[in-house]
Image (cartoon, rainbow, N blue to C red):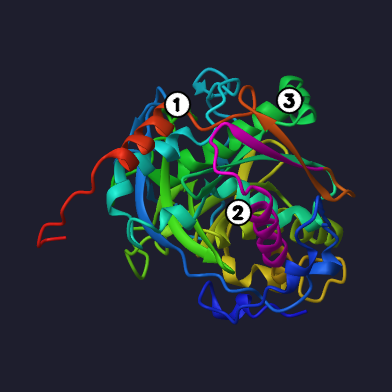
Amino acid sequence: MESRGTKRGAEKIEEAEPWNKLLPASSLPTDPALYVGPFPFYRRPSELGCFSLDAQRQYHGDARALRYYCPPPTNGQSPNFDLRDGYPDRYRPRDEEVQERLDHLLCWVLEHRGRLEGGPGWLAGAIVTWRGHLTKLLTTPYERQEGWQLAASRFQGTLYLSEVETPAARVQRLTRPPVLQELMYMGYKFEQYMCADKPGGSTDPSGEVNTNVAFCSVLRSRLGNHPLLFSGEVDCIDPQAPTTQPPTCYVELKTSKEMHSPGQRKSFYRRKLLKWWAQSFLPGVPNVVAGFRNPEGFVCSLKTFRTMEMFEYVRNDRDGWNPSVCMNFCAAFLSFAQNTVVQDDPRLVYLFSWEPGSPVTVSEHRDAPHAFLPTWYVEAMTQDLLSPPKTPSPKD
């Protein structure tokens, strides 16, 4: 069924949430056929702020890690970027054993809690999470390989969602073969070839690839009747974009292997493009620039995919994906979570679990190891609640 969202952008679209009939329940089905229907309301995302993580993965409430899109000249020649260059000598990957949960986003919330767009009470009705967690929800109806777990807690009215590494994902990470580790490096190396540290600057692919460094946008939106505050990493900003207003000036950078056959293209459009669409549609990033690499690891061509046109590649594919199904399922899950997590207690955790071919199930837990809202955050927010309200100044 045609998604009106693919033509009208992430604007206000007719609200349609017929999924409440599934709730309350102890599980949530994920069959795509159940979520065919009109595209749900999705508020155009607006950027509330940003933060950066430095080379030591330390938080800074500013844009110091933002990079600038600097593509090679379009003279008809192959970019010929060597994505293997510097591996492994100039590679400093982030320590994946460190469980960061929502901590960096919560640092930002603490810094800005008194002046959030929407008023001081807005956060109490919102869902706070990472963009990557929402991306997994969007792609769930079509995912056939990787399951997920999301921990949920309610605190001062706000519902917090934080991903938990599944046992299977942990085994996969710890036994990751060298070829996959090198492929991960190649994605970051591509960004180095395509980004400069300042507008109008030059790229410097001779430097270290340090995946601790990140620039993150913090966004406000609403899916159905669920207000959202979420954050996601941004690859770069385009100084030549038609508007300098985030997030529409941001660019997502991706790599993929060269395609030579109709079968390869069909697989790419069905699987990889779905994830690219979900990741970019949620924050309102308009363009994904892909570098296609050959078996030797050199980028042979660049192609720009417009986020709002990605669905066109699978519109007539009976085994393709549908944006309406993705968004309707996400809305259904958020309703399921809101109706399940009713007790306001930061130490109480509901663990939502899903494996391909099964419904989403939920289990209840308390304290370690499942509790994920840090003590420093809970104490600071509780202190705010106990403090007498500040008398607004005329400027407020």
Other-residue count near label 3 (Cα within 10 Å), few / some / many at <14 / 14–19 / ≥20: few
SS at circle 1: helix
Circle 1 residue: 375
x then y, percent, for residue 45? 46, 64
Q: Earlier in the sequence, mark 1 or mark 2?
A: 2
Q: Relative to residue 379, is residue 188 drawn left or right?
A: right
CA distance separating discs 3 and 1: 26 Å
Residue lying at the far left in this picture: please name it: 394
Q: Amino acid at mark 3?
A: Arg
Q: Is 284 contained in the magenta span?
A: no
Circle 2 residue: 301
Which numbered tag is attached to residue 170? 3
Which numbered tag is attached to residue 322? none
Q: Relative to residue 80, is residue 382 drawn left or right?
A: left
Q: Earlier in the sequence, mark 3 or mark 2?
A: 3
CA distance separating discs 3 and 2: 34 Å
CA distance separating discs 1 and 2: 49 Å
x then y, percent, for residue 171? 78, 23
Closer to us: mark 3 or mark 2? 3
Q: Is 241 located above or below residue 343 in the figure?
A: below
Q: Amino acid at mark 1?
A: Thr
What is the span of residues highlighted in magenta in the rendered image? 327-354
SS at circle 2: strand
Q: Residue at x 54, y 75 (%)?
A: 9
Q: Is residue 332 visible?
A: yes
